[in-house]
């Protein structure tokens, strides 16, 4: 796997060029871990991709989708609806910008203090 770097950049070249769900997912995971939230990836069909437990007692369920042409699996809309009816937060994020908005909303004081994302 190529790990060449652009001059002046700390990120591997392949990560800078990455598009689609894998790039969004990598950015999401890195951002959540930087804020030291508890995070797990779901392994159950229909369940949101990620469960994130924040320090303030909030637990979010986050579904990540490709920016273009992405569709839900058959069970996902029903599961999301059931979770919301029970008072849980369910977010569906398509882009890195949406991930950044989500992180800014959850980060203490609106940003990751002392953490480079």
Image (spheres, helix red, strand yellow):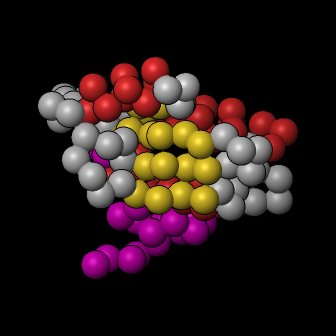
Left/right placement of residue 103 relative to residue 42 reads: right
Q: Quadrant of the N terminus?
A: bottom left
Q: Hey, which quadrant is residue 14 in on the image? A: bottom left
Magenta span has 17? yes
Q: Residue at x 49, y 26 (%)?
A: 86
Q: From where the camera sits, is residue 18 visible?
A: no
Classify 77 as above or below 47: above
Q: Hey, which quadrant is residue 39 in on the image? A: bottom right
Q: x, y (%) of residue 45?
A: 22, 47
Q: Residue at x 60, y 59 (%)?
A: 38
Most extreme residue toward the front, as rendered? 86
Q: Quadrant of the C terminus?
A: bottom right
| Bounds of the magenta segment | 1-21
Q: How many labels sit on residues?
A: 0
Left/right placement of residue 17 relative to residue 103 reads: left
Nearer to the camera, 12 or 103: 103
Q: x, y (%) of residue 61?
A: 47, 40
Q: Residue at x 65, y 56 (%)?
A: 37
Classify 64 as above or below 26: above
Most extreme residue toward the left, as rendered? 74
């Amino acid at each position: 796997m190529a790990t060449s770097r652009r001059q002046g950049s700390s990120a591997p070249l392949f990560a800078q060029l990455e598009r689609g769900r894998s790039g969004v997912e990598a950015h999401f995971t890195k951002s959540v871990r930087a804020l030291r939230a508890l995070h797990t990836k779901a392994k159950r069909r229909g369940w949101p991709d990620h469960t994130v437990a924040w320090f303030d007692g909030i637990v979010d369920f986050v579904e990540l989708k490709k920016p273009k042409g992405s569709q839900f699996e058959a069970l996902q809309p029903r599961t999301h609806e059931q979770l919301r009816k029970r008072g849980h937060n369910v977010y569906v994020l398509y882009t890195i910008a949406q991930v950044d908005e989500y992180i800014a909303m959850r980060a203490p004081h609106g940003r990751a203090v002392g953490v480079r994302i």
